[in-house]
């Protein structure tokens, strides 16, 4: 292979792209999960039951199903910056619309449309990162991007704590939460159109030598994945065909295992994140403001766990155990909450463990699809994995809402959490990677920072 990109070039790419992708993903998650904070006050103002809140939270993911695979393919074959910019403007507008709902049917409709508007964002960014970062750096780059998830919960909790008590211009605080959190998505959607660069070959902020080195490295990596595919006996006829890519992704054993893993973790993860503030309020009796601040603690801890696990996965070149072990620990940590309801301190400590390890597995997990397949097939696989998981994401909040209403307790809900994470940990452990990433510790020309 030609000369590898220098550490300085890698730092330049990471500094240019990752902070911005992190920032816009924070905006995305604020708009996606502000429903959990609004659920503290919205049911009282609108007369919504827990089942209505759970169903509305889940309907978001049914809308999300619509454009997951097309979104990933659009980024692979057309333009990341245009697609992401369109998504952000759309979801910002729909989030603002949420501030003016009054009935359950309006709630369901706007949540569904929010899912449609945001669909394709996450898989699109994961595909986009494969255009810029090699496998040896991918878990760390994904970790730095997905660190937006816990950060958005921390920031969102503070914002919700400030806005929920207000009553401005005759609008309740939860309405202002949607109104003010939707506007940044519209603004930065426009910025994204001009800021992001689709491919290294188009990056005027790199030198010609730097562009060539990155392009050559990405091309060589994809050649190796295609060679491994041929060696495994799978057909590679017309490898750039969209239909071929879809067929390969949908019939690959490893991709199906990854899809099952992501579905189960989405079922458990979105269930607990949607109902966490309500659960803590029920346990403690604290005010909505205090509860939203307490809800931020698990996500602050998970930020550290995610970055450390992603860094170590790249350092060792190992993926499966770095994805599986955190999930198993998260599942085991949920077991005590099934059998008894401890006080707020112990419950919060267990939730910190669950959510920290739940998020720690993400960087290693999302580095795996592009190690299994390449080119259009990898883009299709990433979209497929995320689209299938939307079933779990939709079911999680609704199922936990139903169990809570029927039992008047969250204890039975944690069966879903514990079983989901343990089974997911077992599934991801069965994935057979064609070859582990070369450990960063053994490469002399890769930045170890």
Image (tube, rainbow, N blue to C red):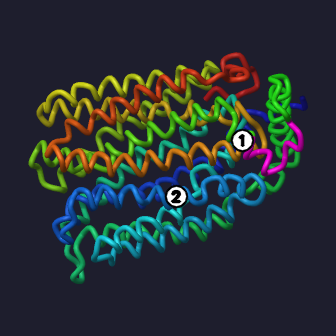
Residue 241 in the magenta stretch? The answer is yes
Is 392 inside the magenta-drawn segment?
no
* Farthest residue, direction bottom: 169
Tell me: 376 left or right of 276. right
Asked whether, in this view, residue 207 is left or right of residue 141, the answer is right
- Depicted 14 relative to depicted 220: above or below: below
Q: Quadrant of residue 204?
A: bottom right
Residue contact between numbered discs 1 and 2, judged by CB atoms under 8 Å: no
Q: Going by the image, does 236 lie left or right of 340? A: right
Look at 58% across and 65% down and name the residue there: 87
Relative to 70, 98 lies left or right? left
x, y percentage for residue 287? 13, 54
Figure check: 291 above or below 186: above
How many numbered badges does the structure rendering display?
2
The residue at the point 33 percent across, 35 percent down is 417
Q: Measured along the vertical axis of the image, is residue 168 above or below residue 444?
A: below
Kindly identify which residue carries mark 2: 64
Q: Position of residue 392 (x, y in %)?
A: 44, 45
Q: Quadrant of the C terminus?
A: top right
| Residue designated by label 1 | 378
The span picked out in magenta is 236-247
């Amino acid at each position: 292979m030609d000369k590898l990109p220098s550490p300085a070039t890698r730092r330049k790419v990471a500094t240019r792209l990752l902070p911005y992708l992190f920032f816009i993903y924070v905006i995305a998650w604020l708009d996606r999960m502000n429903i959990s904070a609004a659920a503290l006050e919205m049911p009282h103002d609108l007369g919504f039951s827990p089942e209505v809140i759970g169903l509305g939270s889940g309907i978001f993911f049914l809308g999300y199903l619509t454009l997951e695979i097309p979104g990933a393919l659009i980024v692979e074959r057309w333009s990341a910056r245009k697609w992401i910019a369109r998504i952000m403007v759309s979801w910002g507008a729909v989030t603002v619309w949420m501030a003016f709902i009054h009935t359950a049917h309006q709630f369901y409709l706007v949540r569904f449309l929010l899912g449609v508007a945001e669909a394709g964002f996450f898989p699109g960014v994961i595909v986009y990162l494969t255009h810029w970062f090699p496998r040896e750096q991918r878990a760390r780059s994904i970790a730095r991007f997905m660190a937006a998830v816990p950060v958005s919960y921390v920031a969102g909790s503070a914002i919700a704590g400030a806005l929920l008590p207000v009553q401005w211009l005759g609008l309740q605080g939860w309405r202002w939460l949607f109104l003010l959190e939707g506007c940044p998505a519209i603004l930065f959607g426009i910025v994204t159109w001009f800021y992001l660069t689709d491919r290294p070959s188009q990056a005027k902020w790199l030198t010609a030598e730097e562009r060539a080195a990155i392009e050559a490295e990405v091309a060589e990596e994809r050649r190796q994945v295609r060679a491994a595919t041929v060696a495994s006996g799978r057909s590679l006829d017309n490898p750039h065909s969209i239909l071929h890519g879809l067929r390969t992704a949908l019939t690959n054993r490893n991709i199906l295992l990854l899809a099952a893993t992501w579905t189960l973790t989405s079922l458990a993860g979105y269930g607990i994140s949607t109902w966490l503030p309500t659960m803590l309020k029920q346990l403690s009796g604290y005010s909505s403001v205090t509860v939203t601040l307490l809800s931020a603690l698990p996500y602050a801890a998970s930020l550290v766990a995610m970055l450390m696990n992603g860094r170590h996965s790249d350092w060792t070149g190992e993926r499966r155990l770095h994805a599986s072990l955190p999930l198993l620990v998260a599942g085991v940590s949920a077991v005590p909450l099934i059998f008894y309801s401890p006080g707020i301190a112990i419950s919060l400590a267990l939730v910190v463990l669950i959510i920290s390890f739940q998020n720690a597995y993400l960087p290693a997990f999302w580095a795996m699809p592009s190690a299994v397949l390449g080119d259009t097939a990898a883009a299709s696989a990433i979209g497929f994995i995320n689209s299938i998981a939307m079933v779990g994401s939709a079911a999680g909040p609704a199922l936990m809402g139903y169990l809570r209403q029927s039992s008047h307790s969250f204890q039975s809900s944690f069966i879903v959490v514990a079983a989901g994470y343990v089974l997911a940990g077992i599934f991801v452990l069965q994935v057979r990677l064609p070859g582990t990433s070369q450990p960063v510790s053994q490469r002399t020309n890769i930045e170890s920072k």
